[in-house]
Image (cartoon, rainbow, N blue to C red):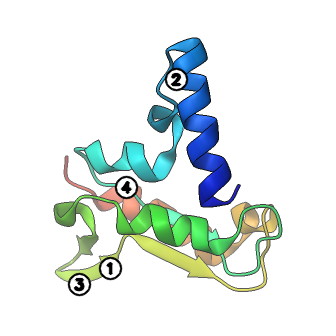
């Protein structure tokens, strides 16, 4: 949805249902995360535009914008090219990045 439609949706649903749908908007909810996270997204995803993932990653708290593996720093956002929306989870490089992240995060 565009910004205008999103604003109307949020306002009308809060008014009618008493539910703050901002809670369900990842780019808003992630601002309150208190643990490391990794966002993996393909540049040419036809179902969810990469701009959505970029927006989410910009809202990750500052202390979790990067993570370290053996003193080497990596960004919390990993962008792929040409994998689309579903093939991304079967890509060997993506699997390695995710496994390395999970194996090395400090909580």
Q: Which is more toward the observer, 23 or 46?
A: 23
Q: Position of residue 40 (x, y in %)?
A: 56, 67
Can you identify the residue that label 4 sits on? 37
The residue lying at 71 percent from left, 72 percent from top is 91
Residue assigned mark 3:
72
Residue at 25%, 81% in the rendered image: 73
- Give the image location of residue 63, x and y in percent: 16, 63
Q: Residue at x 27, y 72 (%)?
A: 66
Mark 2 sits on what residue?
14
Q: Secondary structure at mark 1?
A: strand
Q: In the rendered view, would you say 31 is above or below 43? A: above
Asked which quadrant contains residue 94, the reply is bottom right
Q: Is residue 28 above or below residue 73?
A: above
Q: Nearer the viewer, mark 2 or mark 1?
A: 2
State left or right for residue 85 relative to residue 102.
right
Mark 4 secondary-structure assignment: loop
Q: Secondary structure at mark 3?
A: strand
* Cα–Cα gap, marks 4 and 2: 29 Å
Q: Which of marks 3 and 2 precedes in the sequence?
A: 2
Question: How packed is label 3: few (under 14 Cα within 10 Å), some, or many (20 or more)?
Answer: few
Q: CA distance from mark 3 to mark 1?
A: 7 Å
Q: Secondary structure at mark 2?
A: helix
User: In whole angstroms, how far apart are the C-alphas of marks 1 and 4?
Assistant: 12 Å
Disc 1 residue crowd, few under 14, some 14–19, many 20+, Cα 10 Å: some
2 or 1: tag closer to the N-terminus: 2
Q: CA distance from mark 3 to mark 4?
A: 17 Å
Foreground mark, 3 or 1, reads 1
Crowding at mark 2 (Cα within 10 Å: few <14, some 14-19, many 20+)? some
In this view, 57 is above or below 102: below
Tag 1 residue = 74
Q: Position of residue 26 (x, y in %)?
A: 49, 47
Q: Is residue 106 left or right of residue 26?
A: left
């Amino acid at each position: 949805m565009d910004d205008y439609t999103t604003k109307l949706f949020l306002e009308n649903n809060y008014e009618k249902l008493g539910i703050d749908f901002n809670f369900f908007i990842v780019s808003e909810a992630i601002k309150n995360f208190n643990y490391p996270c990794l966002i993996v997204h393909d540049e040419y995803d036809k179902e969810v535009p990469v701009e959505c993932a970029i927006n989410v990653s910009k809202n990750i708290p500052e202390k979790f914008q990067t993570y370290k593996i053996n003193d080497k720093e990596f960004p919390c956002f990993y962008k792929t090219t040409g994998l689309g929306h579903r093939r991304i989870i079967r890509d060997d490089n993506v699997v390695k990045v995710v496994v390395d992240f999970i194996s090395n995060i400090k909580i």
